[in-house]
């Protein structure tokens, strides 16, 4: 039996349709326990991702703003990125924050890990909180990145979460958990 398949499920065939660093598409033919066959089931293989709720000692939340071609719109987001092969997710989050914003340091903690979409995707998103981050240098963006940084207070951030200024579900999930758990009331000196 293939790893992770429940009893009665069978993979009848599997082939890769597309392979790139950022996206691999696999097509499988599946047989379910009752004998029903799904002739084309597509699985998206992505590397794991990270995102960070970054907070300065002054209580300002660090957001980025960038254009996202899939939706054809520009929106606010948490700093996020890809975990490189063999890289620890916490180190990837620190690297991405420093590269995309120029901010680093602080006290880091893991908030949660969530699935991007368990129906079709193989990767996880590791969500972190970084308290007491400070600007260390200018952004170190890749040629494909056009990112601006923004510092907002907690009330403004909550308004942005509610009014649609932040649309990325994988960023809203840890933000809502952060506020629901009262973690916004924890000062950087308490961690």
Image (cartoon, helix red, strand yellow):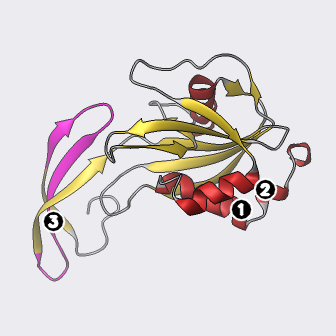
Q: Where does residue 180 sit, x and y in percent of width and height?
A: 71, 67
Residue drawn at x 56%, y 61% as measured from the top left: 163
Q: Can the viewer see residue 117 in this picture?
A: yes
Q: Earlier in the sequence, mark 1 or mark 2?
A: 1
Query: Which of these two is toward me, 91 or 67?
Result: 67
Q: Is residue 58 left or right of residue 40?
A: right
Q: Earlier in the sequence, mark 3 or mark 1?
A: 3
Residue drawn at x 53%, y 52% as measured from the top left: 166
Q: Where does residue 121 sit, x and y in percent of width and height?
A: 34, 54
In what element is the residue under mark 1? helix
Query: What residue is shown with label 1?
Result: 179
Query: Which of these two is toward me, 126 or 4?
Result: 126
Q: Outermost residue, right direction?
A: 189
Q: Is residue 154 above or below residue 92?
A: below
Q: Is residue 23 left or right of residue 35?
A: right
Magenta stretch contains residue 32? yes
| Residue 155, quarter of the rendered image | bottom right
Magenta stretch contains residue 105? no
Query: What residue is shown with label 3?
Result: 30
Magenta residue span: 15-36
Q: Is residue 142 above or below residue 174?
A: above
The Cα atoms of the two marked residues, 3 and 1, are separated by 41 Å
Q: Where does residue 105 sit, x and y in percent of width and height?
A: 76, 28
Q: Where does residue 60 sit, x and y in percent of width and height?
A: 77, 42
Residue drawn at x 33%, y 35% as measured from the top left: 22
Query: What residue is shown with label 2?
Result: 184
Q: Is residue 81 above or below residue 190?
A: above
In what element is the residue under mark 3? strand
Residue drawn at x 41%, y 18% as measured from the top left: 143
Q: Is residue 13 left or right of residue 129?
A: left
Query: Which of these two is toward me, 57 or 174?
Result: 57
């Amino acid at each position: 039996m293939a790893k992770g398949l429940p009893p009665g499920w069978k993979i009848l065939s599997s082939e890769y349709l597309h392979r790139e660093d950022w996206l691999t598409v696999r097509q499988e033919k599946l047989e379910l326990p009752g004998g029903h066959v799904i002739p084309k089931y597509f699985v998206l293989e992505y590397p794991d991702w990270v995102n960070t709720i970054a907070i300065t000692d002054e209580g300002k939340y660090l957001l980025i703003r960038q254009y996202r071609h899939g939706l054809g719109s520009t929106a606010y987001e948490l700093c996020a990125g890809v975990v490189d092969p063999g890289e620890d997710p916490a180190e990837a989050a620190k690297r991405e924050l420093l590269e995309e914003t120029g901010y680093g340091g602080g006290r880091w903690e893991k908030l949660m890990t969530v699935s991007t979409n368990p129906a079709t995707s193989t990767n996880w998103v590791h969500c972190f909180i970084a308290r007491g981050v400070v600007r260390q240098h200018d952004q170190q963006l890749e040629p494909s990145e056009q990112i601006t940084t923004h510092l907002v207070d907690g009330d403004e951030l909550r308004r942005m979460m509610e009014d649609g200024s932040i649309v990325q579900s994988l960023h809203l999930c840890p933000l809502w958990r952060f506020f629901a758990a009262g973690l916004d009331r924890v000062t950087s000196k308490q961690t």
